[in-house]
Image: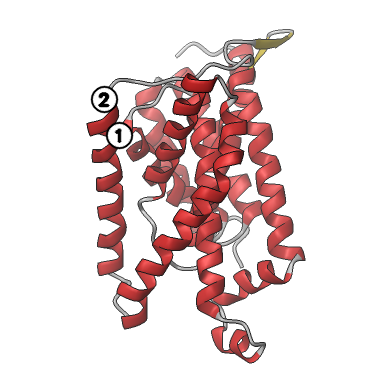
Amino acid sequence: MIFSFDLLINAVVSGILIGGFYAAVTCGVSISFGILDIVNIAHPAFIILGSYVAYIVNATFGLDPILTSIVAVPAFYALGAGIYQIYYVSFEKHGQESLRGLAFFFGLLFITEVTLVLYFGVDYRYVDAPYIGATWHFGFVDIPLRILVPCVVSLLLIAVLQLILTRTFVGRAIMAVAQDQLALRLMAVNPIRIKRIAFGISIATASLAGAFLIIIQPVEPSVGRDYIGRVFAICVMGGLGSFPGMVTAAMLLGIVESITATFYGPSWSPAVAFGFLLLTLAFRPSGIMGR
């Protein structure tokens, strides 16, 4: 290992930017798993689906991938609401959500990946945008816009979600639904409807996260597997249901991975990152900002 202060600063900056992307990837899981207690391991598959939607529209019409993902948000919301309704009727209603529900989401992950492979093949796909390839230079610090733009939009997305969850009636109902459904019923609120809305929002975030992913790197159908462990690790490390904790955990994980990859090689970064998770849980079992 050759230590360089310039490399260290660039690694920290890159880690912060990648952490912003990790936060966007994780915010949907933070809602479904952290708040609703639904272990949606198929979430990365919906992110890849969002990437391919951005790719198709960009390749056909030349539309910006982030703008495409924003337009696609209602469709992903409707998809998420429909999936939750199937999940509720088939499993949660009968108290079988623990194991059979997990198999249900694993099946969705498998079906989505296989469908994309059959239709698009295993070739890597990418998009074109004015900020892809451009880099800002501040002295010895390089900031690629293909990472900066997703990071900034990601933080805006999380800020909007935090405002919705804390300042609106529906948002507060979402925060309360996993804690006291009887209290919600006494307020004439249907917990199942609130869960359907929350799960729809969690899948809607996959549209934006998918656009960020294909901006940062080319994608193929199995890329989503690389993020299954990361998203749940960040969600747990930040504190279940805590968006500020999730962002903090995502930034820390991004920095640790970036520094490790810079000085020791990329093969070490997952091991060090998850070692960091284990240390966090050993000294702070509820997560960084868990209740």
Secondary structure under tag 1 reads: helix
Which quadrant: the C terminus? bottom right
What residue appears at the point 71 percent right and 48 percent down from the top-left corner? Answer: 159
CA neighbours of label 1 inside 10 A, class few (<14), some (14 to 19), many (20+): some
Whole-angstrom CA distance, mark 1 to mark 2, is 8 Å
Question: Mark 2 or mark 1, which is nearer the start of the sequence?
Answer: 2
Q: Position of residue 93 (x, y in %)?
A: 36, 80
Q: Position of residue 199 (x, y in %)?
A: 50, 61
Is 241 situated left or right of 164 in this image? left
149 up-or-down from 191: above or below: above
Quarter location, residue 129: top right
Quarter location, residue 3: top right
User: What is the three-letter code of the residue carrying label 2?
Assistant: Val
- Which residue is under mark 2? 122
* Front-lying residue, 101 or 125: 125
Give me the disc on residue 20.
none
Residue 81 seen in this snapshot? yes
28 up-or-down from 150: above or below: below
- Which residue is under mark 1? 222
What residue appears at the point 22 percent right and 33 percent down from the top-left corner? Answer: 118
40 up-or-down from 86: above or below: above
Q: Are marks 1 and 2 in contact (CB under 8 Å)?
A: yes
* Front-lying residue, 277 or 14: 14
What residue appears at the point 50 percent right and 27 percent down from the top-left corner? Answer: 57
Is 229 situated left or right of 5 in this image? left
Secondary structure under tag 2 reads: loop
